[in-house]
Image (cartoon, helix red, strand yellow):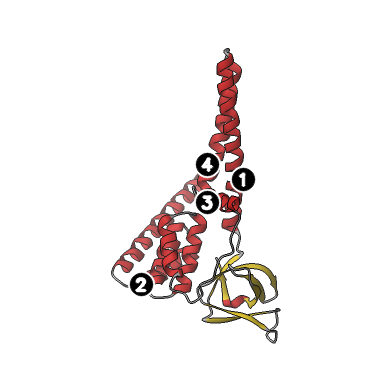
């Protein structure tokens, strides 16, 4: 028992010092950025993330540092990674929009059905963690309303508690679905950013195949299939083809 307690305390202190070290490094990266030493800031942020301390703020700050050095593909990649944690964040979306306005490709996006647009917009109201918390909180409140319904002796009271319970149940189902979808999407790697200045997209996973069209660095693509060292991609206008995996980086 004493040994377990000692190990627990040891892990607690180790975690505390690791967090303190990261915070010190983050402050160092911020000071380097403010002083205009963007390359130093980038190397510190990259090191922190590589050690497993990824967060939306780290990706956002790293994206800003890359943007300052005019490395647009890396800036866009990190803004997109930050958005996976905080979909709908205004600062991230604004900076991402500015970075995207400076890349070569201006792709027309295929129109979506109104309910798909509405659902996507709804998902950005909260972060994945917040949707999960909302689902747990609403599920807990359902038990409270059920107890109040059973304890209420008036018909009008029971009607109110029943109606509130139905609304809460619907919200619980919606928040649960969104939490699951946003969590899944945040761990998927089916989106990528092009990191080659000019990239011909092939008709098949073969160097000798026909060039269908050309895309450029900084463009976001969707990975729809993989064969060996090749990825089949789709761009926003629906066109698709094959590129080497080394030419793109997953979000």
Q: Is residue 152 above or below residue 162?
A: above
Check the picture and name the quadrant holding the N terminus: top right
Residue 67: mark: none
For the C terminus, give its image quadrant.
Answer: bottom right
Q: Position of residue 137 (x, y in %)?
A: 53, 36
Between discs 2 and 4, the one toward the N terminus: 2
The crowd level at tag 2 (other Cα within 10 Å; few <14, some 14-19, many 20+) is many
Assign a secondary structure to mark 1.
helix
To which residue does mark 1 refer?
177
Q: Which is more foreground, mark 1 or mark 2?
A: 1
Q: Is residue 97 above or below residue 201?
A: above
Mark 3 nearby-residue class (10 Å; few <14, some 14–19, many ≥20): few
First of labels 4, 1 by sequence position:
4
Whether label 4 touches label 1, CB < 8 Å: no
Q: Give the labeled residue for mark 4.
A: 133
User: How far is the residue under mark 1 from the one under mark 2?
Assistant: 40 Å
Residue sticking out furthest to the top: 153
Query: Counting residues from the N terminus, which is met first, the one under dot 1 or under dot 3?
Result: 3
Q: Are marks 4 and 3 in contact (CB under 8 Å)?
A: no
Q: Residue at x 49, y 50 (%)?
A: 11
Question: Viewed as shown, does residue 39 lie left or right of 153?
Answer: left
Nearer the observer, disc 3 or disc 2? 3
- Residue at 51% from the left image edge and 43% from the top image edge: 5
Please tell me which of labels 3 and 2 falls first in the chain.
2
Labels 4, 3: front one? 3
Which residue corresponds to mark 3?
121
Residue tagged by mark 2? 38
């Amino acid at each position: 028992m004493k040994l377990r307690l000692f190990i627990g305390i040891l892990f607690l202190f180790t975690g505390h010092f690791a967090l303190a070290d990261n915070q010190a490094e983050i402050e160092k990266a911020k000071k380097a950025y403010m002083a205009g030493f963007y390359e130093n800031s980038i190397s510190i942020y990259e090191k922190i993330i590589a050690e497993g301390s990824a967060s939306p703020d780290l990706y956002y700050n790293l994206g800003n540092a890359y943007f300052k050095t005019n490395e647009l593909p890396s800036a866009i990649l990190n803004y997109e990674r930050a958005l996976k944690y905080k979909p709908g964040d205004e600062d991230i979306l604004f900076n991402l929009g500015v970075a995207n306005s400076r890349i070569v490709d201006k792709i027309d996006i295929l129109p979506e059905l109104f309910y798909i647009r509405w659902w996507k917009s709804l998902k950005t109201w909260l972060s994945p963690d917040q949707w999960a918390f909302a689902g747990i909180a609403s599920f807990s409140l359902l038990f409270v309303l059920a107890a109040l319904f059973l304890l209420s002796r008036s018909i009008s009271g029971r009607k109110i508690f029943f109606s509130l319970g139905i609304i809460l149940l619907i919200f619980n189902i919606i928040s649960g679905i969104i939490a699951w979808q946003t969590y899944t999407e945040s761990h998927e790697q089916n989106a990528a950013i092009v990191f080659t200045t000019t990239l011909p997209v092939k008709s098949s996973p073969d160097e000798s195949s026909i060039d269908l069209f050309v895309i450029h660095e900084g463009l976001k693509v969707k990975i729809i299939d993989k064969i060996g060292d090749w990825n089949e991609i789709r761009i926003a206008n629906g066109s698709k083809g094959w590129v080497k995996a080394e030419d793109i980086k997953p979000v």
